[in-house]
Image (cartoon, helix red, strand yellow):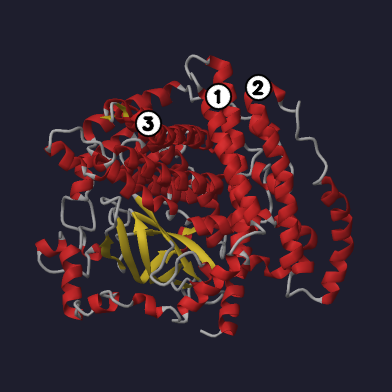
Amino acid sequence: MSEADELIQAREARAVAEASRERVWSGASFIRDLFMGRFRLELIESLEFQPPTRPEFIQFMQTLRGFLLSSVDPVEIDATGEYPPDVIQGLRELGAFGLKIPKEYGGLGMSHIEYVHVMALLGSHDANVTALLSAHQAIGVPQPVLLFGTEAQKRQFLPRCAKGAISAFALTEPAVGSDPARIQSRAALSDDHTHYILDGDKLWCTNGTLAELLVVMARDPETGRINAFVVETSWPGVTVEYRCRFMGLRALANAYITFRQVRVPRENLIGPVGEGLRVALTTLNTGRLTLPAATAGGAKKCVEIVRKWSSARVQWGQEIGKHEAVALLNAKIASSALAMESVAHAVGEIADREQFDIRLEAAAAKEWNTVRAWHLIDDTLQVRGGRGYETELSLAARGEPAIGVERALRDARINTIFEGSSEIMHLFMAREAVDEHLEVAGALVDPGASMAQRLAALPRAIGFYAWWYPSRWIGWGRWPRYRGYGPLAKHLRFVDRCCRRLARAVFHGMAVYRAKLEHRQAFLFRAVDVAMELFVVTVTLRRAQLLHERDSSASDGVLELADLFAAGARERIRQHLRGLWHNADSAGYRVGRELLAGRYEWLERGIIGIAEQADELTPMSLEDLLAEHAAPTEEPGPAPEPSRQSQVGQGSEDRRAG
């Protein structure tokens, strides 16, 4: 592809994404203000950080805990790669498929903060079940229908979902990941305007092999705009072609699904015509609450693992937890777990407050917690040593406790890709970071703006920056400010100073790079990393202070944990800020481009390459391989309906159930 073609495609992709984003801020955003150099601690201080006390919720949590302990065996689910039918049925009977669905539609009507606590409990026990429930109600049919559906759609679909009609989300395509401008699936309105004709292929539909209902994104061939639909998997033309298998989450009911001339009633359109991508993006704002909560639950489990193992294991005459190297790892794990839980609780509570706009906080929580969880579990494995690398079944066979750190590491890796990869989360937050600047001076840095538009924008830009920029240098972030936080106050003062430094840096980046700033992803990503760390430090310090004030004996040492975490975060923030202007990005980018051009092919000599390995798979053997590993397209039980049979694995019963 030529550079001109690349530029055209990039502009098209940006135009689609820009048209679909929420252009109006519906409430306050702590992180958005950070990017502009405004440290609004009062927004975080308005959060209560109190556990839910509703009696119905407490009863549900007790029942769920009992069910997980008695009926959900994570080792078996991982080993078999299947959800046992009694587990799915048990979840249905608990009402777990309708956690956030309002009671009037048959659900449990939980608040977002209650949902966060449920997901933390699930995340501490089994990631496969967490993914099943999360994909169903966080990004499946319930959430977009609740947010954008008509009353008729809510009454048609939500009671079914609450009772356990599993749903899935179909956006990704074989050649399309996070670039909506390239979606190939088409949904054309029929001549009589009563239905759409849907054609296309969708990849990695979590819950797809179990789902009764799908949310499908497809392009209108007439307008080019994207629409969202509720599609029944039992309809003619909907086919589960293949069940995808992964490194972790081995029971994940993930499907490759095709749609061939599927007749979708017009009343199954979700939201306004042409607004499908906005439906998807808005759904993900609160849909992203699951992963911060689940990873926080898993982190707390890691604290228990390293505490007990470091006390029991003796090396060189003392417990390994007393050796400095292990003690420092354990301290990092414990302080990180406090921060991760604080973040999860904060965004859960923010989602329940109408005065907040959660889009940046939800994205930051998803990104920061999932990345931190990956490193935290890796550290936990290091503390456990060989036993961390050994499987639970092998440990149990040798008579040792079956502690699943190896499984947890495999399951956790997908979290930085699920529901928006780390790179996409950074790009999303970077765009929102400069939103206020673009409102004021966007025409000045837009290469497509005319001279008249630039001249018209100039007076407003001068008027805004004449007071804004000098004020980012002025502000008191020193003692005695925030002295009510005692030993934690110094960290809040640091955040106060750094947010102004961050705002200046973003402005300087716009001034230096102008229209090319969007291509300086490393610069923008570091700015986003700074904002995320400042957000995480603030919510952690606030929650720690509240826990200490309410009952210091019940949270003994919480101030010390928060202090340690904040000290480490400050080092990371300083590195990110320095890296904005002192880095090897240009050299790295140049090498990366030359790698694509083949300049470093000599590095690949002396190995057995992927092309040589691929030669071993002839077209016939590849087909046989797919058939051999094709999984059931429904829950174990009765044979699937003909319209849902896997065309890849059709043949004998053994081939279909492989």
Which residue does the image show at 48% across and 18% down from the upper left?
A: 556
Determine the CA span between mark 1 and mark 3: 23 Å
Neighbours of disc 1 within 10 Å: few (<14), some (14-19), many (20+):
many
Residue 649 in view: no
Q: Residues within 10 Å of mark 2 (few under 14, many from 20)?
A: few
Q: Which residue is mark 1?
A: 559
Which residue is at the front of the view, 329 or 147?
A: 329
> Which amino acid, mark 1?
Leu
Residue that appears at 33% across and 38% down = 383
Pointer 3 residue: 323
Q: Residue at x 36, y 65 (%)?
A: 203
- Residue 163 seen in render: yes
Q: Is residue 108 left or right of residue 429?
A: left
Q: Quadrant of residue 358?
A: top right
* Quarter of the C terminus within the rendering: bottom left
Q: Where is residue 568, by image quadrant? A: top right
Nearest to N terminus: mark 2 or mark 1: 2
